[in-house]
Amino acid sequence: MNETKDTKQSLKLFIVLSRAYKALNEEINKNIQENGLNPTEFAVLELLYHKGDQPLQQIGGKILLASGSITYVVDKLEQKGYLKRVACPKDRRVTYAQISETGRSLIDKIFPNHEERIHELMSALSPEEKNDAIELVKKLGLSIKNLSY
């Protein structure tokens, strides 16, 4: 197959983005695990902490996790006392996940360090470069949504 220079550059970009994401993710996950949570548990708690009560059926889409896994994660967080299930008073088919005071205290304690660690990891880029990266990666992501085969 005869690859064009542009095709090779696209492949290189894909590899660079993938490796950067993997490196960032591994560092952030270490930090999360030091606090007794796995990354998915942290993502659910962080969502509830910042966005409030969420229908169980919608959590997966918001943190990019399969819906079948959400029940397991919510069960584990409930057993640890970090969240509780609350029935919707208007629709009995809907159950909300609600962060508990214990869960809120945990996130209050660990989120500032999490946020600072992300900032440290991103410090290789200037504020202008971060803005450029945000716009370019956003453009890429949105363009992929618009592709249809």
Image (cartoon, helix red, strand yellow):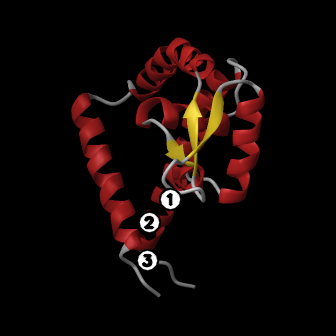
Q: Is residue 125 left or right of residue 24?
A: left
Instruction: From the image, state whether disc 1 or disc 3 is nearer to you.
Output: 1
| 10 Å crowding of disc 1: few (<14), some (14-19), many (20+) | few
Q: Nearer the viewer, mark 3 or mark 2?
A: 2
Total labels: the figure holds 3
Kindly identify which residue carries mark 3: 4
Q: Quadrant of residue 98?
A: top right
Q: Earlier in the sequence, mark 3 or mark 2?
A: 3
Q: CA distance from mark 1 to mark 2?
A: 6 Å
- Disc 3 to disc 2: CB gap under 8 Å: no
What residue would you read off at disc 2? 10
**Which residue is at 52% across, 48% downward?**
89
Q: Residues within 10 Å of mark 2 (few under 14, many from 20)?
A: few
Q: Earlier in the sequence, mark 1 or mark 3?
A: 3
Residue furthest bottom in the image = 149
SS under mark 3: loop
Marks 1/3 in contact by CB < 8 Å: the verdict is no
Residue at image coords 50%, 64%: 11
Q: CA distance from mark 1 to mark 3?
A: 16 Å
Q: Position of residue 51 (x, y in %)?
A: 42, 37
Image: 148 above or below 58: below
| Secondary structure of residue under mark 1 | helix
Q: Report the amino acid beneath label 1.
A: Phe
Question: Residue 99: percent from the left, percent from the top?
Answer: 56, 29
Type of residue at label 2? Ser
Where is residue 30 shown, x and y percent of the image?
Answer: 67, 25
Q: Where is mark 1, residue-wise?
A: 14
Residue kind at label 3, given as amino acid type: Thr
